[in-house]
Each structure stands twice: as structure tokens, then as C-alpha cells.
Amino acid sequence: MELMNDAAGYSAPGQGDLSVLDIGCQLDFSPGYITPAGGESSAGLSYSLESYEHVSAAGKYSLVLRAVDGWAALSGWRARHQFRWNKTSDDVNVLGIVRFVLARAGLGLAIRSQSAAVTGFYPDFTIGPGDSGREVIQKLMSFVPDVIFIEGSVAYLVNPLPTDSAVYSYGDGHPVLEGTYRRGAMKTNRVQVEGLGAGLIMAESFAWDEIERLYDRLDQVADRDIDSVSEAQQRGQAILRQAAIESEGGSILVPVNCGQQLYDVVAVTDARAGLDAVRKRVLGIVLGYYPRRGEYRQRLQLGAV
């Protein structure tokens, strides 16, 4: 974030009236609109201030703030010693281990939707000394079809289903300024998963329509945490589900929607591209506010539902 400092109002961060603006403080960015009711804003993202830099050059004076979000907090947490769950019995499911790791990084967990796998899978799971929280969360989420996104100090769990309804529409009342829409083959359309139970366990999952188009594109996964055929099948289906979402891509540039969230399903209408209320899933949000150029725009990265 770059703040204008022409009047030297930001010359002394951490002191006097700016005592709260110091390394480690929380920065909240809440975008909004001017409406008939006045200035209205939505709860936005929160960041932790890592550094700041004064810039004085060619008649330009500004304060540049560099901050990080909850994913950085997860990356910064590293296990001090070994943790292990479900070695001899089913004690803690995937959701419970995820909650445990998030708490170590100072993050809460809110559930918007969840799969049966995230509460029904009890992996024999180990965190080694030095493992980062981000790596551990990514490993745990690879077991299930659910996804996580972080806003402020809260991580949200979502199970993205192909039957999800659109929560907002672009292209009619909310114009699409520019758009790109890509559809491609799934990188993986057949998955073999091996695990260890009383003996070797293996299960296969297939995306038959994709195999018929392009022959099979095989992904083989070996994981000692899997000890039943049903768990192996769930893992294979989770991998195929992610491949299906990523098989479509593109983005739209739109006037800002302050209520948009990651993994929402939206309906996009763009007659130039043959789209009429076609459902897309929001996989990324880039919000840019450039007052010097008078620009306030949002770009949404899109994937398949």
C-alpha cells in the first residue's frame, strides 16, 4: 500500500498520532461505496505490517507499507517438536488436525460447507520438527475435496460442489469491462491411490468423459496415511475434482464488488464470448485502487464450478 505523504503527515510512523502504525500492527482494508445512505463498506482483508519505506523523489513523497496475510502467518509457524495422530486408533479427523494447526498460527476456523471426508478421514498423520504450518495445511487439504481461504484472522472451509448455485451475476446489471475464458483438458483423468492397511490397498478413480476424449492421463499416489479402500477412493476423487475445476480458466475485469469472496459461484453473461449466465467459480480476486489515476477496479480469476 502506498500512502501520499506530500504534507509529511506520515513522516513518523510509530510515534505520536501514528503510534499504532508500527511494525507488527494489523492493517484492515475495507472497500466500499458512496450510496444514498452515505459511505458504506464491507469487511475486508487484514494484514500484518512487515516493513515501511519512505519515498522522496522527483517531487513525489509517499509512505509504502508492505504487509502479509494469514498464509504468511502459517508459513512462519514451524513445529517445535513432533506431533502424531491416529497411530493406534481413530482419535482426530482431518478437520480436527487442520483446526489444531491453524490455532498454532493464531487463526480461527469457520465452516461454510464441508465434505464427509473432512470429518470421516482419520489419517495416521505426523508433523515433523521444522515443518511449516502452510505445508502441513496443504498436505491435509490434499486428502479431501474441501478448500480453505483466509480473511483476516479466520480461515474459511468450503466444499466446492458442481451443483452450487450462483450467488451473483456479472454482465447485465454489473458490467464486464473485459474478459477471457479458457476451457481445456483435465491434466489428470485417472488416479491410482495406494495405501497401507493390513496389506497393500489400491483404488482407482476415473473421469470417463475426459478419457474418451484424450485417452488416460494417469496420476499415481502412494500415501501411508491411507488404510482403507474407501479412503483411497476419496483421495482419488478429490484429485479429479481439483483437476476438473482447473480445466477451465480465464478472468473478468469488473467494477468493484465489495462482497465478492473466494470460491463463490457467479453467473457470467458475455454475448461476445457466447456466455449467457454461465456459472463460474471465483478462484482469485485482485482489487486495485489507484487514486492518482482515478481507477478502482477488480479482476476475478475464474475456474469451473
Image: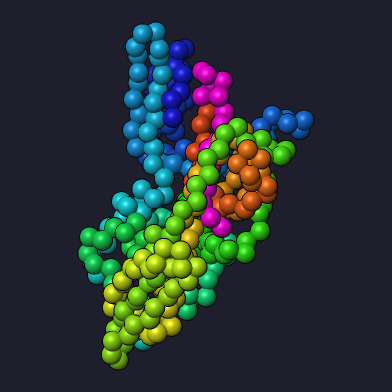
The answer to which of 253 and 24 lies nearer the viewer is: 253
Left or right side of 273 for 155: left
Residue 170: image x %, image y %? 66, 42
The answer to which of 24 and 76 lies nearer the viewer is: 76
Residue 305: image x %, image y %? 56, 58
Vertical placement of residue 129 versus 179, above or below: below
Q: Residue at x 39, y 78 (%)?
A: 204
Write down the region rendered in magenta.
290-305
Magenta residues: mostly which secondary structure?
strand
Left or right side of 46 for 13: left
| Residue 71 visible within the image | yes
Direction right: furthest residue: 36
Q: Residue at x 66, y 54 (%)?
A: 166
Q: Quadrant of residue 272?
A: top right
Q: Is 294 colored magenta in this rendering?
A: yes
Residue 235: image x %, image y %? 41, 73
Direction bottom: furthest residue: 198
